[in-house]
Amino acid sequence: MNKLDDLIALCQGHPVYIQTHNFPDPDAIASAYGLQKLLALHGVESRLCYDGRIDKLSASKMLDSFQIRMLPYERLLPHMRESDRIICVDSQKHGGNVTDFIGDEVACIDHHPTFVPVEYRYQDIRITGACATLIAEYYALSGSEPDRDTATALLYGLKMDTLQFTRGVTELDIQMFAFLFPRCDQEKLADLERNNMEFTDLKAYGAVIESIELYDKVGFSCIPFSCPDALIAILSDFILALVEVEVAVVFSFRTDGIKLSVRSEDPAVHAGDLLHEALKEIGSGGGHASMGGGMIPRDRLPELGNYPENYIRNLFLRALEKNGRAGTEDAP
């Protein structure tokens, strides 16, 4: 398999770091872990790393279940060198949620659209439901057999990022499900999928329910307190489940700024493009057709004025109007 051979050749003889986005979710963790194990089969050792936080219960359970060691950037900083090789996984350099580490980002494996083009020495960026699908394909095409933990982790990441195969699924996702399923530990997979909500999450659910505003088929909800990235994404799925909502915009006020998550089941509204257009002058954002995330950094918050919720809502309504999707009919 030329792709894997090229990646191995690029890594041999160098310290290698596999970097996820700043708040790694199950798909990012599974993809990084699966790639680490695959490279090890071919004599390349690597370290998993991230910046930010592990802020989702499902992600923490993964790390514990598979004994995955992911190191925060602050612990690696004294040891990293500019010549060290970095592989971006489930993320892209300058993607808005990825810290620029010391080291050379020589490779990228990702399933998100590209908004800031970067020249990598190795690149595999394809639109699939999950990044874990791409890593699983490396195993399948190279004839490398994943162990049970690796297959289970990849399958869990695939199921989580496609919302149990209901979001952004491609034919390759289905093929890799068929490849991974007979190789996984079904009991461990079932345990990972149980009890992934914490009691404190209920407060955030209450906030989005209390604050929801509907403009045509676009639902906006504000969480007036700090909420983890992963939970904001879950809450945008929750709002999208309403029969009246085709596009959901959920945002949380945090110490680092305002974090946003968008979901769309309207074929005329690309969630990633909507985020990119709405936030281009005040922050950053992007993602897939059906899902995306964005951020307005703390130093830009004064520009939102005294009514930041209204300011954000108007940014998105203007972007929708520019896209030809009006979304201007107020709910009662």
Image: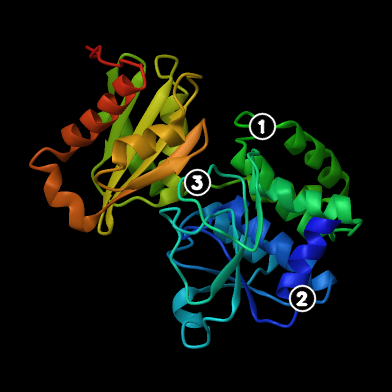
- To which residue does mark 3 refer? 197
Q: Quick check: 175 left or right of 322?
A: right
Q: Nearer the viewer, residue 308 or 15?
A: 15
The amino acid sitting under disc 1 is: Val
Q: Is residue 236 visible?
A: no
Q: Is residue 26 visible?
A: yes
Under circle 3, the secondary element is: loop
Label 3 crowding class (10 Å Cα cut-off): few <14, some 14-19, many 20+?
Answer: few
Protein image colouring: rainbow
How far across and down, in percent of the image, does residue 171 sit?
Answer: 75, 31
The amino acid sitting under disc 3 is: Met
- To which residue does mark 2 refer? 44
User: Quick check: 232 above or below 265?
Assistant: below
Earlier residue among tags 3 and 2: 2
User: Quick check: 317 above or below 34?
Assistant: above
How far across and down, in percent of the image, does residue 329 sit?
Answer: 25, 11
